[in-house]
Image (tube, helix red, strand yellow):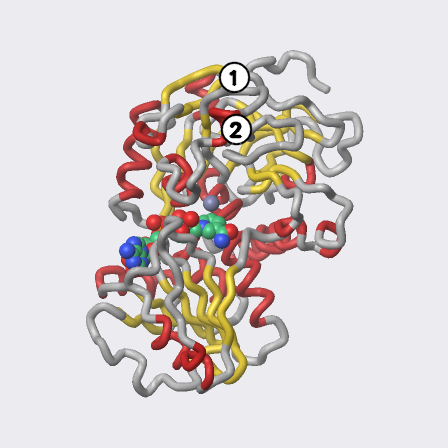
């Protein structure tokens, strides 16, 4: 363990969802340091739409978890596309070393002992703890990466290949991994896979590039044709503006092995139309997680024509994160990133612009070492 790292972390926190877009600089006690824990000195951090839902508390009926925590901060720092250097390691850590550049996504801990954890499905561990807004067994509510440091279990700290610059690899930690896992699991072993991606935002634009790098023929679905040129540049083979042609699905029967929904709302999703263009027994999967009152409106007859199914996918495993980083290094694909210097004003800008869809296609907050003097 390195001794000269701080006992208090600094980060940008809120205490009331009404102030979701104005996190304030604060100091707080980190979680207790476990023997498998790693402290990361943050260099940069992506901004994911999940943070909007969490900060506004739109996924839950309960108040912010930190407000009722038995110990630890009574404020909430988000951020879960973290790249930084390892500055402390617990006694039993073998997967990271001091000084190493690592990445941390939306998961910070799991039990490491259940059948899910031992089959590369630790993202579905029933004792999983998220990187932010998530309760550890001892009551501490996890604090994320809009901060000087984050503490997480070594399993979730991924070594970053030298070739990829930090600001461009940060979005792969949550968004990239979240789309890589279902795409890879669905198309593995299929000759000439055909994949459709709905919602060309942060996750969606990475999904287009990742599906392409995995050898798929890719169709991008967006509400309007505004993003058409960009999507084709990202590697999409075709583009459909679902909001501009009511009959877009006619003539596309049997077109897709997988359709992956990356949209942050279901309000513009015509699930019947998407189900109608799947091949037999294939899947419409969603990684998009809308606010709590939205749902999928589906009738059994939607599925009957092709025996298709619908499902949801969560994050990805460590093994998949490492595969994805390898794929990114090999294919040289990079998320389309706009960087913003970290500060209260910078975070306000990033969150509010993401909230109104004014992003092409991911923000990465940078300059943490300068800001925090680390
Ligand atoms: P972005 O805001 O960057 O992108 C979302 C996209 O959804 C937009 O670009 C837009 O695409 C589409 N969209 C926006 N509003 C609507 C609407 N009202 N109706 C239909 N489509 C809409 O978000 P992210 O990519 O960061 O996140 C996407 C979703 O994924 C979020 O719900 C997030 O919480 C979730 N997520 C889930 C994870 C998981 O493990 N399952 C992990 C990480 C994130 P277009 O303009 O092309 O139509
Ligand atoms: Zn995320």
279 or 227, nearer to the observer = 279
Q: Which residue is mark 1?
A: 28
Point out the residue furthest to the right here.
Answer: 92
Work out whether residue 159 can be spotted.
no
Decide if residue 201 is on the left or right side of residue 166.
left
Mark 2 is surrounded, within 10 Å at the Cα level, by few (under 14), some (14 to 19) or many (20 or more) other residues, namely: many
What residue lies at 52% left-to-right and 53% top-to-bottom? 178
Point out the residue furthest to the front here.
Answer: 61
Judge whether 234 appears above or below 41 on screen.
below
Judge whether 49 appears above or below 63 on screen.
below
What residue lies at 54% left-to-right and 66% top-to-bottom? 214
What residue lies at 32% left-to-right and 36% top-to-bottom? 350
- Secondary element at image label 2: loop
Residue 79 in picture, x, y percent from top left: 46, 35
- Answer yes or no: do the residues labelled 2 and 1 have beta carbons within 8 Å? yes
Q: Earlier in the sequence, mark 2 or mark 1?
A: 1
In space, the residues marked 2 and 1 are separated at their CA atoms by: 9 Å
Q: Quadrant of the N terminus?
A: top right
Judge whether 96 appears above or below 236 on screen.
above
For residue 143, the mark is: 2
Counting the numbered discs, the total is 2
Res 160 → quadrant: top right
What residue lies at 65% left-to-right and 38% top-to-bottom? 109
Res 54 → quadrant: top left
Residue 341 in picture, x, y percent from top left: 36, 28
Residue 87 in picture, x, y percent from top left: 64, 23
């Amino acid at each position: 363990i390195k001794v000269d790292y701080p006992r208090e972390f600094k980060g940008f926190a809120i205490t009331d969802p009404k102030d979701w877009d104005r996190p304030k600089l604060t100091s707080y006690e980190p979680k207790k340091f476990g023997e498998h824990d790693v402290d990361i000195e943050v260099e940069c951090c992506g901004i994911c739409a999940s943070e909007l839902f969490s900060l506004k508390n739109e996924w839950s009926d309960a108040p912010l978890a930190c407000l009722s925590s038995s110990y630890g901060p009574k404020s909430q720092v988000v951020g879960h596309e973290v790249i930084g250097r390892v500055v402390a390691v617990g006694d039993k850590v073998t997967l990271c070393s001091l000084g190493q550049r690592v990445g941390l996504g939306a998961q910070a801990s799991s039990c490491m002992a259940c059948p899910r954890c031992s089959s590369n499905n630790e993202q579905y561990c029933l004792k999983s703890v998220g990187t932010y807004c998530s309760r550890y067994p001892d009551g501490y509510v996890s604090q994320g990466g809009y901060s000087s440091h984050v503490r997480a279990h070594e399993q979730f700290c991924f070594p970053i290949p030298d070739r990829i610059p930090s600001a461009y690899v940060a979005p792969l930690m949550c968004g990239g991994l979240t789309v890589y896992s279902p795409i890879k699991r669905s198309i593995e072993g299929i000759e000439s896979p055909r994949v459709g991606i709905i919602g060309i935002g942060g996750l969606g634009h990475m999904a287009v590039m990742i599906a392409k790098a995995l050898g798929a023929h890719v169709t991008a679905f967006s509400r309007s044709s505004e993003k058409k040129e960009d999507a084709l540049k990202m590697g999409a083979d075709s583009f459909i503006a679902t909001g501009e042609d009511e009959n877009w699905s006619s003539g596309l029967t049997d077109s897709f092995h997988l359709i992956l929904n990356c949209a942050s709302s279901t309000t513009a999703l015509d699930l019947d139309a998407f189900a109608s263009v799947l091949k037999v027994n294939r899947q419409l999967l969603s990684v998009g997680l809308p606010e709590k009152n939205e749902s999928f409106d589906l009738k059994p007859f939607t599925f009957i024509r092709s025996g298709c199914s619908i499902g949801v996918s969560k994050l990805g495993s460590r093994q998949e994160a490492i595969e994805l980083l390898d794929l990114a290094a090999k294919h040289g694909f990079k998320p389309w990133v706009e960087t913003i210097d970290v500060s209260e004003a910078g975070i306000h800008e990033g969150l509010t612009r993401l909230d109104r869809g004014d992003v092409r296609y991911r923000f990465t907050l940078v300059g943490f070492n300068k800001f925090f003097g680390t």
